[in-house]
Image (cartoon, helix red, strand yellow):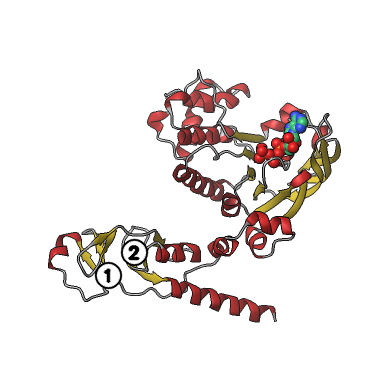
Amino acid sequence: MIEFSDVTKQYPDGTIAVDGLSLTIESGSFTVFVGPSGCGKTTSMRMINRMIAPTSGTISVDGKDITTSNAVQLRRGMGYVIQSAGLLPHRTVVDNVATVPVLQGVSRRAARKSALEVLERVGLDLALATRYPAQLSGGQQQRVGVARALAADPPILLMDEPFSAVDPVVREDLQNEMQRLQAELRKTIVFVTHDIDEAVKLGDKVAVFGRGGVLQQYDEPQKVLASPATDFVADFVGRDRGYRGLSFRTAGHITLREVRTATESRLKELETRTGEWVLVTSEDGAPRGWVDWNGTVAAGGSLFPAGGDLRQALDSAISSPSGIGVAIDPQGKVVGGIDAADVLDQLARQRRTERSAQQ
Ligand SMILES: Nc1ncnc2c1ncn2[C@@H]1O[C@H](COP(=O)(O)OP(=O)(O)OP(=O)(O)O)[C@@H](O)[C@H]1O
């Protein structure tokens, strides 16, 4: 457990970066510090591993005031990942990951062996292990950065905007990987971002910081979206918060619609009525796109993993040229369709149930 008690940081030039922060971070939880630039997220995070000292207040880890531990010792229990990955340019990937264990006295051979295991765990192709950082893409470098932070198996992981510098597709991959890893490892993670979407996706809890380093709200992400504590939070989470909130609601109860399908090889024989769309699939049932009643082929929209959330369901419907979202099973085969009205009905039903449970 990490505990901030009335922590303030004022820099020598008078800037108050963090103002009276009190916050408890449970062990094994994924906590995201989010807020606009300059609101004290990084300063707060760096006070946890004593890279920055508070002006007043105390921070404790597992009940122990961190100023009573040796800073080097303290940092051994905390992996640290930064935006630029921060890899050593003249060391290979595997040696970058092995660095900290070697410094801690593990033999080079044993450290390399476990470095390869960690690299595999973060989803890096092991063929890249003998490359130098400059020979990797930004996304691959970030995976190595995460592997390096995990190499000494620290209970706490501090991550400062780790995925900000990569493109949105790679970023989503890295976020998914992080969720998978955390389900496996259950570290205490503190993650800084200015992206509210990233925060609500990854966080068990989200701490929204405002101007002057004042904590505005510390809550589960769905609560931050549904009931912003201040105007600042409402403004920061933005107009799409209703749509974002759908990602916390299951679409598992929606009955899928039947969708007319045709394999690519049978397209020529297809007869359709006006207004009818047919979903084109591969021979093994994976969706390929849609064809309309004139025989015009259109690319498909996003796919809805059956049993997923309402946001995925709605997005699949509204991004589909036919208006019908395509639901797929874990093998990627089409299992049915979903339209936007089904999603809105389900939302209304869930809300009614919640309201009657509250009464
Ligand atoms: N060494 C320093 N000296 C003086 N002021 C500083 C110093 N480091 C940060 N600040 C100021 O403290 C405030 C908080 O900065 P901090 O980096 O913690 O914010 P942040 O929320 O992490 O921002 P960003 O998302 O831009 O990194 C800002 O006003 C910043 O300019």
- Dot label at residue 105: none
The residue sitting at 71% across, 40% down in the picture is 38
Of residues 162 and 14, the one nearer the viewer is 14
- Looking at this rendering, what residue extends furthest in the right direction? 56
- Vertical relation: 274 (above or below) 62: below
- Dot label at residue 321: 2
- Vertical relation: 291 (above or below) 204: below
Q: Quadrant of residue 302?
A: bottom left
Disc 1 C-beta below 8 A from ligand 1: no
- Percent coordinates x, y for residue 228 in the rendering: 70, 61
Q: Secondary structure at mark 1?
A: loop
Of residues 281 and 230, the one nearer the viewer is 230
Question: Could you tell me the amino acid type at mark 1?
Answer: Trp
- Percent coordinates x, y for residue 143 in the rendering: 50, 36
What crowding class fits label 1: few (fewer than 14 Cα within 10 Å), some (14-19), or many (20 or more)?
many
- Vertical relation: 263 (above or below) 61: below
- Percent coordinates x, y for residue 303 in the rendering: 38, 60
Q: Is residue 323 left or right of residue 87?
A: left
Q: Quadrant of residue 295?
A: bottom left
Question: Could you tell me the amino acid type at mark 2?
Answer: Pro
Q: Is residue 128 left or right of residue 285?
A: right
The residue sitting at 53% across, 73% down in the picture is 347
The residue sitting at 36% across, 59% down in the picture is 301
**Residue position for label 1:** 277
Location of ligand 1 given as a quarter of the image: top right
For the C terminus, the quadrant is bottom right
